[in-house]
Amino acid sequence: MRVPAFDFPVIEKTFKSIGTRDVKLYIFETAETKKKKAAILFFIGGSFKKNPQSPAIFQPQANYLTQLGMVAICVDYRAGHDEGFTPKQAIADAKSSVRWVRKHENELGVDPEKILMCGSSAGGYVCVSSIMFDHLNDDPHYHHQSRDHIPNALIIFGAGMDGVDIMQRRYPELAGQASEMSPFHNVKKVLPPTLWMCGTKEDTPTIPNGLYAQNRTFVDRMVEAGNEIIFEEYEGMEHGFFKYGRHENKYFHKTNSRMEAFLKELGYI
């Protein structure tokens, strides 16, 4: 099992165990206060690959929001390096992670009504799917109709929402269930207040700028269905443009500032 390397002090917590696999949270250390804080859980992209990215990829953003007074958490959910992995496991882990944070609100100093999920790419798909699909759950202690896994707000960086396309390309054994795991094919009023950031040059594996077009269409349809989503597009930017180290950190800082403004609008910081 991999051990993520963080450059900042973190507290490691196991929120779930599946066989010998401990599924963990990496919680950024923050100054103790009497007032409970908003929390944000980060879900990395690239998680469907056999050699997925480390959850530490989001640590620069996590550290930034920690400095603003939030409890920031990087989630090491099950991913492509886990034996027998499918996206169903990642979605179930996302639900379990939010439940665990709410259950341990006093230990963490977290306000249970101010919990956010933030995901990019595959991590964005996992976050949205964990909210949209009640039937995907492997925690026997919770009924699938329980709502305690739903965050109070959501932040997404360019993410594939077409589950049919994802399953056809990566998990053909799930082709018969793909439409039931596809946000793009199940538009409804279900998301909490959401900030969605996407570059206009984000591609799908087969369509140039296709991911941008898919995200734009999905968000437009979701807004029409009654969801409150702010869509921010970044002209000429590629998939992952917001990461620390790219574009001399111009868009890392821009997107951090936009997240900060969104969080202030919600009263979370």
Image (tube, rainbow, N blue to C red):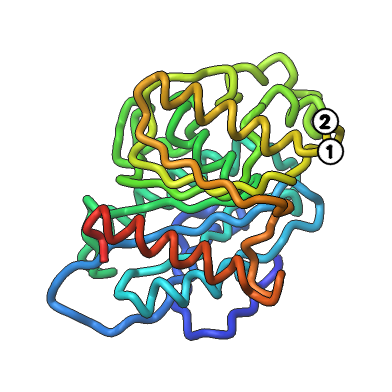
Q: In this view, does 254 lie to the left or right of 29?
A: right
Q: Is residue 37 visible?
A: yes
At label 1, the amino acid type is: Pro
At label 2, the amino acid type is: Arg
Quadrant holding the C terminus = bottom left
Q: Is residue 135 left or right of residue 218?
A: left
Residue at 52%, 18% (x, y): give it.
Answer: 186
Answer yes or no: do the residues labelled 2 and 1 have beta carbons within 8 Å? yes
2 up-or-down from 184: above or below: below
Name the mark on residue 205: 1
Quadrant holding the N terminus = bottom right
Question: Which of the marked residues, 2 or 1, is nearer the chain's N terminus?
Answer: 2
Residue at 52%, 33% (x, y): give it.
Answer: 129
**Along the line of sight, which residue is nearer the eye, 252 or 162?**
252
187 up-or-down from 41: above or below: above
Query: How far across and how far down the image is residue 146, in percent?
Result: 30, 31
Judged from the image, the secondary structure of the residue bearing numbered disc 1 is loop
Name the mark on residue 169: 2
Q: Residue furthest left?
A: 34
Q: In this view, does 149 lie to the left or right of 110?
A: right
**Along the line of sight, which residue is nearer the eye, 1 or 9?**
9
Q: Is residue 78 visible?
A: no
Judged from the image, the secondary structure of the residue bearing numbered disc 2 is helix
Query: How far across and how far down the image is residue 122, in percent?
Result: 65, 45
> Alpha carbon of mark 2 to alpha carbon of mark 1: how far?
9 Å
Name the mark on residue 28: none
